[in-house]
């Protein structure tokens, strides 16, 4: 009789090494594990160390068929306490230059272990779509590969058209004045699937005057790689992004919307994986007891994600806007949230909010959003945060900062009607006004009704028989089980 490990499919999953990419791919790893896959999840050595610091060994204590491996990232060691977000441009450069060789070596080690019967042989790869080297590795080993987009369908579709924007002379910008003279309101109605989009609604890498901007070139390279891939999955649904998905399906061989992941995972048995985690920041615990003391739907949750940085002046505007709203709030402030320095809030502010505000360094966001006391979310509009807020039925106040966040903000506020946008040049009066509108205003009530409808549909799509549920089964049978 053959060894049972030989018959079990073995998926190796590798995310782009940043928090917003790790979390959703980790969710997909859990979903595949629940469908019988042996899972190898690949971290960089730097992020593995951060996970150990934030969560301890329990972060990796799953089961024998869900394990973790590491590869070096090729970046120089820093003097920091190994608890800061690495520079995005540097990460993108090292991904392209330094990841292929150690990834090849890792796959070889895994298959060597399979020969002696310790684990099943690798049968497929699942890769973040921004890691273009993984397609080459899959071809070398004749393995099926599935790309994963950690961003929305609208964001991916936007990036797929960066080259065309350049060819049409729409980017780069002629000079800095084009950022403020109305040029970014240029309509892009000629792009199928992006109805009523303007340049300002595209991922913000295009807001550059540099014809050789690295992030634009990196995005175009990623788009070229996606065009050649056999299939891609996206953490979204037809309910949320039907037009963008339709347009992507006309461009790419196979597109599978299999989200939203939070609803998927909340309806799936995973008690044996509960100890596993992917948060790189150490989570505070004080927030839970604090929220228990608050009325239902009364608290504003504030979190600008893992990458956003702001000036001390903007931090103060947010702080006093929240304080002046008189609403209870839970504000997550990372140690590196303020650009070029530490976070300093005055004793006057601390005294003002002592009876209604709690500041923490990090938290399990999905758990917070689903707490009955949370009534609104002041967010940077990262796609994970957007999806988690929808699945929790929480409307949003939006302050997009970077990358795909303007695109997500456009959908939240204009397409779905579940959010209000704050101007980039944030002022405390505007923060106060929008927070109160969100929590007790008529517009806030309408947004809450709409987001609750989206929450209900997300549950329907991800339960047995739902569209996303069936799409996951299809991608397993049509892509991951396919023999090259």
Image (cartoon, rainbow, N blue to C red):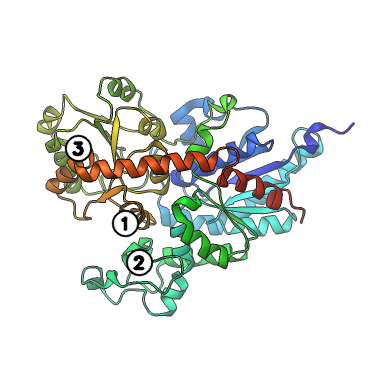
The x, y position of residue 188, in whole percent, is 37, 72
Which badge, 3 or 2, comes first in the chain's sequence? 2
For the residue pair 21 and 395, the one nearer the viewer reads as 395
Q: Nearer the viewer, residue 415 or 270?
A: 415
Quadrant, the N terminus: top right
Residue indicated by mark 1: 414
Q: Residues within 10 Å of mark 2 (few under 14, many from 20)?
A: few
Mark 1 or mark 2: name the one nearer the start of the chain. 2
Image height check: is 298 above or below 186? above
371 to the left or right of 475: left
Q: Quadrant of residue 190?
A: bottom left
Q: Which residue is mark 3?
A: 440
250 left or right, relative to 359 = right
As helix, strand or loop, the secondary structure at mark 1 comes to helix
Q: Are the residues at dot 3 and dot 2 in contact (C-beta closer than 8 Å)?
A: no
Which disc, if any, is residue 196?
A: 2
């Amino acid at each position: 009789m053959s060894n049972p490990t030989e018959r079990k499919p073995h998926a190796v999953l590798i995310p782009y090494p940043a928090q917003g990419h790790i979390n959703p791919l980790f969710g997909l790893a859990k979903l595949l594990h629940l469908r019988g896959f042996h899972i190898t999840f690949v971290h960089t050595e730097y992020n593995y160390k951060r996970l150990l610091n934030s969560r301890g060994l329990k972060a990796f204590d799953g089961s024998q068929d869900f394990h973790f491996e590491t590869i070096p990232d090729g970046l120089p060691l820093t003097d920091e306490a190994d608890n800061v977000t690495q520079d995005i441009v540097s990460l993108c450069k090292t991904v392209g230059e330094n990841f292929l060789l150690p990834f090849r070596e890792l796959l070889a080690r895994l298959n060597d272990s399979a020969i002696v019967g310790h684990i099943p042989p690798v049968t497929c790869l699942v890769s973040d779509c921004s890691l273009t080297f993984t397609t080459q590795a899959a071809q070398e080993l004749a393995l099926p590969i599935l790309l994963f987009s950690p961003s929305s369908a609208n964001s991916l579709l936007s990036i797929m058209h960066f080259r065309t924007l350049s060819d049409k002379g729409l980017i780069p910008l002629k000079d800095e004045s084009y950022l403020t003279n109305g040029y970014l309101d240029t309509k892009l109605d000629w792009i199928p699937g992006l109805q009523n989009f303007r340049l300002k609604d595209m991922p913000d890498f295009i807001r550059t005057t540099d014809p050789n901007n690295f992030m634009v070139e990196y995005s175009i390279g990623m788009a070229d790689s996606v065009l050649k891939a056999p299939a891609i999955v996206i953490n979204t649904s037809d309910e949320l992004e039907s037009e963008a998905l339709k347009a992507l399906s006309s461009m790419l061989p196979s597109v599978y919307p299999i989200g939203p992941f939070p609803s998927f995972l909340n309806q799936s048995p995973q008690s044996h994986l509960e100890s596993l985690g992917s948060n790189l920041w150490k989570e505070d615990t004080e927030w839970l007891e604090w929220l228990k003391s608050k009325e239902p739907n009364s608290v504003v949750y504030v979190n600008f994600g893992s990458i956003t940085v702001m000036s001390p002046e903007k931090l103060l505007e947010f702080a006093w806007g929240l304080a002046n709203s008189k609403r209870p709030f839970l504000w997550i402030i990372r140690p590196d949230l303020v650009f070029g320095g530490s976070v300093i809030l005055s004793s006057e502010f601390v005294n003002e909010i002592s009876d209604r505000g709690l500041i923490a360094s990090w938290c399990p966001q999905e758990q917070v959003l689903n707490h009955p006391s949370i009534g609104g979310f002041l967010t940077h509009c990262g796609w994970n945060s957007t999806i988690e807020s929808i699945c929790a039925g929480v409307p949003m106040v939006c302050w997009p900062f970077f990358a795909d966040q303007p695109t997500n903000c456009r959908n939240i506020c204009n397409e779905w009607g579940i959010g209000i946008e704050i101007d980039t040049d944030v002022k405390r009066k505007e923060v106060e006004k929008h927070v109160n509108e969100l929590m007790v205003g008529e517009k806030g009530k309408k947004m809450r009704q709409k987001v609750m409808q989206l929450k209900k549909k997300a549950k329907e799509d991800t339960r047995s028989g739902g569209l996303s549920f069936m799409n996951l089964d299809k991608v397993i049978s049509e892509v991951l089980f396919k023999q090259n």
